[in-house]
Image (cartoon, rainbow, N blue to C red):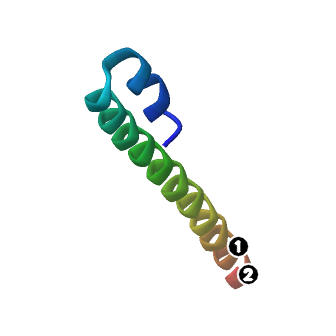
């Protein structure tokens, strides 16, 4: 939601909403990226343990 403040300053209330949505999407993307990296690491560890 950190993008909503600049959006509010430059575009008004609509900019705040758009900035909030962009912030939400960015945060979700980062969270999912970390989960994927952790899962890939676990898969690699499992493959190495079976060898």
- Mark 1 or mark 2, which is nearer to you? 1
Work out whether 3 lies above or below 21: above
- Which of these two is toward me, 51 or 29? 29
Q: Quadrant of the C terminus?
A: bottom right
- Which of these two is toward me, 25 or 10? 10
Which residue is painted at 56% across and 63% down in the image? 35
Please state if 44 lies on the left or on the right of 14 as rendered: right
Percent of width and height locating residue 5: 48, 30
- As drawn, the label of residue 15 is none
Q: Secondary structure at mark 2?
A: helix
Work out whether 40 lies above or below 45: above
User: In which quadrant of the rendered view does residue 31 lie?
Assistant: bottom right
Query: Which residue occupies the extreme top position in the image?
Result: 10
- Which of these two is toward me, 35 or 1? 1
Work out whether 46 lies above or below 34: below
Residue beneath disc 1 = 45
Residue beneath disc 2 = 49
Q: Secondary structure at mark 1?
A: helix
**Marks 1 and 2 in Cβ contact (< 8 Å):** yes
Local packing at callout 2 (Cα closer than 10 Å; few below 14, some 14-19, many 20+) is few
Which residue is painted at 73% across and 81% down in the image? 49
């Amino acid at each position: 939601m950190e993008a909503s403040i600049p959006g509010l300053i430059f575009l008004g209330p609509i900019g705040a909403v758009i900035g909030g949505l962009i912030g939400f999407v960015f945060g979700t993307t980062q969270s999912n990226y970390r989960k994927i990296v952790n899962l890939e690491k676990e898969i690699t560890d499992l493959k190495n343990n079976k060898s």
